[in-house]
Image (tube, grey):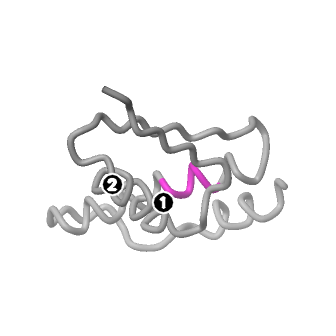
């Protein structure tokens, strides 16, 4: 049985777009295993985007679970994201 392989090489600012692409592969593969790879070079803006994705997911998960861990990104973190490119 062949596997379906998805390779994400250019992260989008919106992680839901990548999730939709991965979900589409699962629907296409249906009975076959789907393997998803994310290729990201170290010390690049893409690496920072992936880190931002994780922060967004953590924030969304906390909001949906009813936890109150904050809702805004700090000014320092925002400046760091845009100045270290």
Q: Label 2: how many residues lie within 10 Å, few (<14), some (14-19) or many (20+)?
A: few
Q: Residue furthest bottom?
A: 72
> Which residue position holds label 1?
18
The reply to whether the magenta stretch includes residue 52 is yes
Helix, strand or loop at label 1? It is: helix
Q: What predominant SS class does the magenta segment belong to?
A: helix
Please give the range of residues in magenta.
49-53
Q: CA distance from mark 2 to mark 1?
A: 15 Å
Q: How far across and down, in percent of the image, does residue 48 sit?
A: 67, 51
Residue 44: x percent and y percent? 78, 46
Q: Quadrant of the N terminus?
A: top left
In the picture of the structure, the residue carrying the numbered disc 2 is 28
Q: Is residue 12 magenta?
A: no
Q: Residue at 57% of width from left, 49% of height from top?
A: 51
Q: Give the class, few, some or many, for how many residues have Cα within 10 Å of label 1's Cα (few <14, many ≥20).
A: some
Instruction: Count the numbered circles shown.
Output: 2
Task: Name the side, left or right, on which 55 lies relative to 31.
Answer: right
Q: Which residue, as the protein is rendered here, is positioned at the far left? A: 66
Q: In this view of the protein, which residue sits in the foreground, 67 or 36?
A: 36
Q: Can you say whether 36 is above or below 48 in the image?
A: above
Q: In the image, what residue occupies the spot 84% across and 55% down?
A: 85
Q: Position of residue 47 (x, y in %)?
A: 68, 46
Mark 2 or 1, nearer chain start? 1
Q: Secondary structure at mark 2?
A: helix
- Mark 1 and mark 2 in contact (Cβ < 8 Å)? no
């Amino acid at each position: 049985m062949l596997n379906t392989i998805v390779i994400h090489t250019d992260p989008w600012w919106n992680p839901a777009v990548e999730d939709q692409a991965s979900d589409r592969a699962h629907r296409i593969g249906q009975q076959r295993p789907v393997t998803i790879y994310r290729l990201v070079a170290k010390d690049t803006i893409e690496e920072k985007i992936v880190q931002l994705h994780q922060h967004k997911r953590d924030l969304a998960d906390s909001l949906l679970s009813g936890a109150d861990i904050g809702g805004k990104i700090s000014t320092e973190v925002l400046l760091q994201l845009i100045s270290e490119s």
